[in-house]
Image (spheres, grey):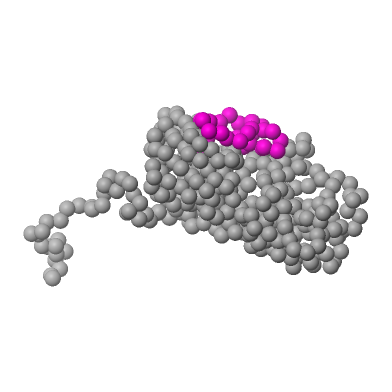
Amino acid sequence: MSGALTILSAGPALSLQDLGRRGYLAKGLTRGGAADLRALHEGAALLGQAPDCAAIEMMGMGGTFEADVDTVIALTGAEMAATLDGAPLIWNASHALSAGAKLVIAGVRAGTYGYLHVAGGFDTPPEMGARSAHLTAGIGALLQASDSLPIEASHARPGLFLTPEGRLSGGVIRMVLSFQSALFSDATRARFGETVFRRDPRANRQGVRLDMAGDGFHAEGGLSIVSEVITPGDIQVTGDGAPYVLMCESQTTGGYPRIGTVLPCDLPKVAQAPAGAELRFQVVSLEEAIAAETRARAEIKALPSRIARLVRDPHDIADLLSYQLISGAVSAAADPFATTGEQP
């Protein structure tokens, strides 16, 4: 049975996102897709579906949602306050969403980007091989109140939980040297590695600005660099000496010098770092980077094996009486040891 999830109220930055578009770099279009790709894989594991299903990405806060068919949802990424018909929901878990029930996702508690998944994904028409909005390129748009997204009725299993990975508060970010790292002196690169940065409020899906105490960072001959191909994860240093980590909707070429490139498996930590969170950068060798990426991909592949049943507080279960709380019946007069031959 086909149905829809309707957005009754929307936060300031809701968009439909999947794994993004590949194969368009030569035409000036980066991959785009979810800012936190691992969160897509986590939602897929909770709902038992492919990770290329689209989800609603919510930056900072969510909104109010209602489905007109019974479905199952999963909540991943940045933790946000969420309720279903007034009952609180646990994050990083799957929940039954009955037709007509009101799902409210409020402000963020940790991290930046939260994700609302539905069983089967959102069945919107693909564009250039993906359903995701690429806001910088003008593909798609932010979701608004009254928008309805097509879904299918589902009987996927709710009540599943996945222990979240610690990536919502910044920390150490691994990077490799880039083609332009040598333009920065040894002393400048060493100072970059010793600096404690803070995630500047000026950040979006295109890039994250880093704030720091003291002088900025400058490359020799930085004003005469010819524009080159760049990739998400590159750390550009602008004319005022401030570093920017380029994210999923970055441009494909640029002329600012790059001091290094963040490992893809650490980019979600940059994306999820809230404003003011501390970030430090650690240079690793290419061999170490490959090993880290290999481990990260193995962890993502193993996510379904880490799924556990969600243990809920009975006080938070609105439909508690619909559960089978006692299995079988016991007679007060019967001998409980009669079937086993054991004696009291």
Q: Is residue 235 left or right of residue 123?
A: right
Residue 128 within the magenta-colored segment of the rendering: yes
* Image height of 95 relative to 8, above or below: below
What percent of the width, then of the height, locates residue 263? 69, 56
Q: Is residue 164 left or right of residue 230?
A: left
Q: Which residue lies at the image location 86% right of the left edge and 57% below the top edge?
A: 219
* Image height of 68 relative to 268, above or below: above
What percent of the width, then of the height, locates residue 198? 68, 59
Camera sees residue 45: no
Q: Which residue lies at the image location 38% right of the left edge and 47% below the top edge?
A: 87
What percent of the width, then of the height, locates residue 324? 26, 49
* Image height of 105 relative to 219, above or below: above
Q: Quadrant of the C terminus?
A: bottom left
Camera sees residue 333: yes
Q: Quadrant of residue 336?
A: bottom left
Q: Is residue 72 left or right of residue 283?
A: left
What percent of the width, then of the height, locates residue 118? 48, 40
Q: Which residue lies at the image location 67% right of the left edge and 33% below the top edge?
A: 139
Task: Name, please, the residue furthest toward the bottom.
Answer: 344
Count of numbered badges drawn on the protein = 0
Residue 27 within the magenta-colored segment of the rendering: no
Q: Quadrant of residue 285?
A: bottom right
Q: Which residue lies at the image location 47% right of the left edge and 37% below the top edge?
A: 65
Asked whether 106 or 218 is in front, the reply is 106
Q: Which residues are magenta?
A: 120-149
Asked whether 211 or 67 is in front, the reply is 211
Q: Main secondary structure of the magenta part?
A: loop
Q: Quadrant of the N terminus?
A: top left
